[in-house]
Each structure stands twice: as C-alpha cells, then as structure tokens.
Image (tube, helix red, strand yellow):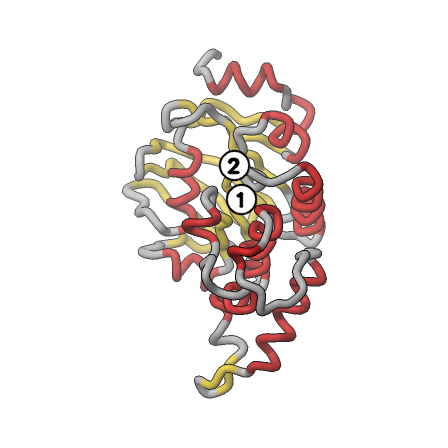
Amino acid sequence: LVIMKLDKVSGNGVKDISFEVKKGEILGLGGLVGAGRTELAQLIFGSERVTSGSITYNGKELHLKECQQAIEEGIAMIPEDRKRHGVILEMSIKENTTMPCLKRISKKGVLSATREDEVTERYKKELLIKTPSINQYVKNLSGGNQQKVVLAKWLAMNPEVIIFDEPTRGIDVGAKQEIYEIMNDLANQGKAIIMISSDMEELIGMSDRVIVLCKGRMAGSLSKNEISQEAILMKAAGAE
C-alpha cells in the first residue's frame, strides 16, 4: 500500500525526484556525500519548501510550509545531528519525550503530570532506554540512549512516516543493533520508514528498496534482490 508518492519534486538543491513509499517498508536513500539525501528529507518534512512537483500523502497532495504541519500529518524526522536538532540536552527524558505531544496529554490547556509520566515510562520500557529515572537529563545519557529519546519523542506522536537520517551515527555496536530492531518492529507495525545512511552495511542490511541519488538527482532505484555495494556505488557515482 503506497502511503507517499513524490512526483518530479524539486527544491532545496534536488531536482525531479519521483518515487513511492509503501507502508511497512524500509526505503533506503543512498548516495555519496552531497548527493542531496538530507535535502530531500527536509522537503518531505517541510523544513524546506518544494519549488515544483508534488508530494502526495495518504491520497492527498501535501502543501507544507513548515515542519509543524508535517508533524500534524504524521510525518516525523530523526535528524542526523541529534545533539543539535534531536533533543534538548539540558532537559529531562520526560520533557523531551512529551514535547511534541503536549496538546494530546493536556486537558483544557493543563498538562496532566500522570499522563506525562505514563507516556514517558511506556517508551522508556519499549525502547529499553537505560536510565535510573525519566527525570534524568538527556546530556547524561550515552549516544545510543540519546538517540532512543529522540525516537521516543516522535513515537509518542504516533507518526505514519518516519525519516531516519543516519540513525546509528556515533553509537556503539550494541545500541546499533537495538535501533535496527526498533526500526524493523516499526516497519512490521505498518509504519513507512525512509532511511538515509552512509553506512553501506546498514543500507544493504536494513533496506527493502534503495533509491540512489547523485548530485541532487535520482540515479536509480534498486529492489531487495538488486541491492549490493557495487550497484549502489555505481549509481551513486553516476555510472549507468
């Protein structure tokens, strides 16, 4: 089931990008540094504007002017630089987790502390966030656990499409494995995942399909049985 369709999308340094994203799949975005992968993700997430072409989501055309609209539609983005864009280090796990969904856990504008605890405890347990307390500052956590807090924050919004930009950069092997398991679980629940990764093993191992970009344009699409390091690199380098 196709949940999102890009048709000749241009803007933010990318040009004429067309592909579909299906429910329950992990779609990899490959390419060399500067190929335009993050730039494309920013268009889908509404942090940059589409100048031409269209993005259709759940059967209707999206006209995003800002990220807030994307979030309300059920599109989430786990950014590459979690310390700068993913979490607020000087705030607690609880404050970070419930930040996007404050409206949902408030009644008549008053925040329910009980609901706030419930939501945070649920994701702490589900994502195996290692911490003595949900009131712990995020800056005191390991890289892998910080990444899980970023995830908790978005999952609390119950998104349908989740963009992961370099999901395991700077985290240890054990935490990497946990992030992969979480991503596979999300796909099994029917979430659509778009994953940008420069880690070739990750891209090959996790993706159901890979879209390869080269210099801001689409260089090709690879199905599960076509995905290989050689195929990705050839397309990324612009070879036919």
Task: Please give the name of the residue rendered at 39% of the width and 32% of the height, measured from the top-left corner.
Answer: 36
Q: Is residue 180 left or right of residue 77?
A: right
Amino acid type, mark 1: Phe
**Mark before the other along the chain sequence, 1 or 2:** 1
Compared to residue 79, the image places residue 70 above or below, namely below
Residue corresponding to mark 1 = 164
Compared to residue 239, the image places residue 5 above or below, namely below
What residue occupies the far top of the structure in this picture?
239
Give coordinates of residue 30: x percent, y percent.
51, 28
Q: Is residue 160 visible?
A: no
Q: Nearer the viewer, residue 59 or 40?
A: 40
What residue occupies the far left of the structure in this picture?
51
Q: Nearer the viewer, residue 118 or 187?
A: 118
Compared to residue 148, the image places residue 53 above or below, namely above
Q: Quadrant of residue 114?
A: bottom right
Q: Residues within 10 Å of mark 1 (few under 14, many from 20)?
A: many
Q: Nearer the viewer, residue 56 or 111?
A: 111
Give coordinates of residue 189: x percent, y percent.
69, 54
Residue corresponding to mark 2 = 196
Q: Is residue 122 visible?
A: yes
Query: Number of labelled discs?
Result: 2
Q: Quadrant of residue 193?
A: top right
Give coordinates of residue 214: x percent, y percent.
42, 23
Q: Nearer the viewer, residue 63 or 99?
A: 99
Task: Please give the name of the residue rendered at 49% of the width and 36% of the height, measured from the top-left corner.
Answer: 19
Give coordinates of residue 64: x percent, y percent.
35, 55
Amino acid type, mark 2: Ile
Q: Are dots 1 and 2 in contact, CB under 8 Å?
A: yes
Instruction: Give the spatial CA distance, label 1 vs label 2.
Output: 6 Å
